[in-house]
Structure formats: structure tokens, C-alpha cells
Image: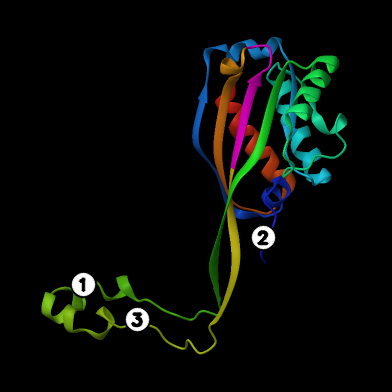
Amino acid sequence: MRFKYVCIVALLALFSSCSSIEILNSWKSESMSDMKSKNILAIARTNDNAARRTFENELVEALQSEGFKASSSYKMFSILDPKQKISPEKADSLKVMFREKGYDAIVLTVVKEVQEFTKSVVSNDNDFYAGAYYYPRYYRGFYGYYNHPSSYIPYNYNSTNKEITTYTSANYVLETVVYDLEKSKEEQLVGIVTSKIKEPDNIEKTSKSYVKKIISRLK
């Protein structure tokens, strides 16, 4: 499977049993504690509305459980193009809209990087390594061990049925940033968490796990 989407939906569509979420770095200002008095708008910048609703709802629920007042942006913006450049005029209209709706803080999540790579899965593998069964035997003397075939040739048998399947997978680097819109431009950033999600495959499980991780760093 090849992953082509550089947005939240691509991130949330690929969670596997061995996937994990790693916090790469995080920072928060002392004023982060003031965010509980704010009306927060949660935004997942993606044009896939289903994935966006799932992610934003998980984030809002987690924020509310920690005592924050938060709402999902999809209820305000029905369509959101993550690649659309915002003009100064559009930015000004957003500011007016936020004020009219009563929002004075933003939690924005974006995909910063997609790291594609190739993996191979081996099936019908009959390779056999005896290892411990030969301790100490030929391991006793260096020259005997060094000269033994299994010290330089893979020790296996009946590998004729081995099947190797190669496919492309991906890890995703996400960034969640928190802004206090009531502060000056230089002081609006009050928190940021950068994370890597390895080979996600289930939208709901990935959303819950990711949100849990970032909230632990921001609260």
C-alpha cells in the first residue's frame, strides 16, 4: 500500500498493532495555565471531513475532561483545505470571525512530514538457528568456532517455501500548537508538541492515543 496523503486523514488511516506515538519535543509557556479561562477552537488542518471530525472531537473531549472550554472547528468551517494559502485579507476575516464567535484561543494540529519507507514481511519461513543448543560445544575454542560453517554461513534448513512480501509504509510527524489570541503577536504561542506516529492504521485508536500524549504535555 502506498500512502499519498499529507494530511491528518493519511496519518489516521494506518494504525497497526506495532505502531507507537513518540513525543519528539514539547514546550509550554508559564501562561499555559491561563488557557482554562479561554474559549478554545480545535482545528485539524485537513480536507478530509470524516477524519477531521473524529480527530477534533477526540481533542475537544480530552480538553474538556481536563477543565478546558473547547469546541471543534468543523462545526464552523464545513470545508478546510490544508494546502490553501491564507491571504492577509482572509487572515483578517478569520480574526473577525473568531472574535464574533467568542473564541480567544486556538489548538491547531498539522502534518509536518511524511516519512515513507519500504518493509519486507517473511512468511513460510523455516530458517532455524540452533544457537543455545550447541552451547558450549564448538563455542569453546576460538579456532574451532571461527572455522565452523555456522559462524559465517546462515544455519538453516528447508527455506524453499519462504515468501517475502515488500510494501511501502510511512511514519508521520505531527505538530500541535496552542495560541492565545488575546496576547500580542510575539506572545501568542503558549504551547507546542511535535510527535511521530509510526505506521498508524486505525483512525479512532490513533486519535485517542495521540490526543492523550499531547494533552499530557500541555496541561
| SS at badge 1 | loop
Q: Which mark is residue 95?
A: none
Residue 176's x, y, as percent? 62, 33
Question: Mark 2 and mark 1: span between their CA atoms?
Answer: 49 Å
Q: Please tell me whether residue 175 belongs to the stretch shown in magenta.
A: yes
> SS class of the residue under badge 3?
loop
The number of numbered discs placed on residues in the rendered structure image is 3
Tags 3 and 2 in contact by the CB under 8 Å rule? no
Residue at image position (21%, 72%) is 136
Q: Which residue is mark 3?
A: 154
Q: Which residue is mark 1?
A: 136
Q: Residue at x 63, y 12 (%)?
A: 183
Q: Residue 3's mark? A: 2
Tell me which amino acid carries mark 2: Phe
- Front of the two marks 1 and 3: 3
* Within-10-Å neighbours for mark 1: few <14, some 14–19, many 20+: few
In the displayed structure image, the side of residue 93 where residue 200 appears, left or right: left
Q: Which residues are magenta?
A: 174-183
Q: Amino acid at mark 3?
A: Pro
